[in-house]
Amino acid sequence: VSREESLSLSARKSVRMERIWMEVNADALRSNYRTLARRVAPLDLFAVVKADAYNVGAASVAEILKDDVPGFCVAMPSEAAPLLGFGRRVRLLGGLFDDEIELAVRHDMIPAISSLETAEKLNREAARGNRILDVMVKLDTGMGRFGFLPDVALDAIRRIDAMSNLRVSDL
């Protein structure tokens, strides 16, 4: 039994799959992206393709949008692998584990920073590679999950921005 047949068989146990399908229209995807990008200009609009573009296929979506987008967003560095060949920036929306820092810096990803400790580690790794790394400072908007709280955010941004090998490019 192939992987596809196995997935199909296991899914059919709970849902009749012939009634459910997904179709992605490349022209509509491109048109929708361009419409949104025009509305937010001059800001950059990255395409979010985390979780393998929500099971559509990150590489497939990237292929469709590669000529229009400045970059892609994923949750973690391992999701960036199929995107690196498109010549676009990759923004990391989730936090980094220590063993992911070198990879993120080596591939010039834009990591989300939610602690000064992570910023310091990224700064050291970027210095080792003699590079300036763009970073996104993550702000906690009230859910208490990830990011700097409002009462410390401005100080954190200033401290991160003062690090010699980091450049705050986004919030």
Image: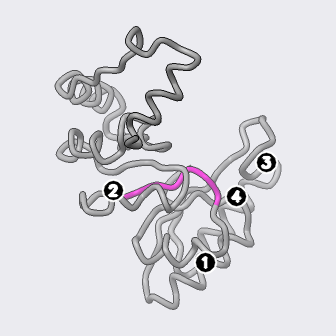
Asked if residue 13 is positioned above or below residue 19 in the image, the reply reads below
Asked if residue 138 is positioned above or below residue 77 in the image, the reply reads above
- Which residue is at the far top? 19
Badge 1 amino acid: Met
Secondary structure category for the residue under label 1: loop
- Residue at (50%, 68%) from the top-left corner? 167
In which quarter of the view is residue 95 placed? bottom right
- Residue at (65%, 78%) from the top-left corner? 121
Cα distance between the residues tagged 4 and 2: 24 Å
Secondary structure category for the residue under label 3: loop
- x then y, percent, for residue 155: 74, 61
Among numbered discs 3 and 2, the one appearing first in the sequence: 2
Which callout, 1 or 2, points to the residue nearer the camera? 2
Q: Return the residue at label 3.
A: 149
Query: Any magenta on residue 169?
Result: no
Secondary structure category for the residue under label 2: helix
Type of colouring: one colour
Q: Return the residue at label 2.
A: 83
- x then y, percent, for residue 89: 35, 58
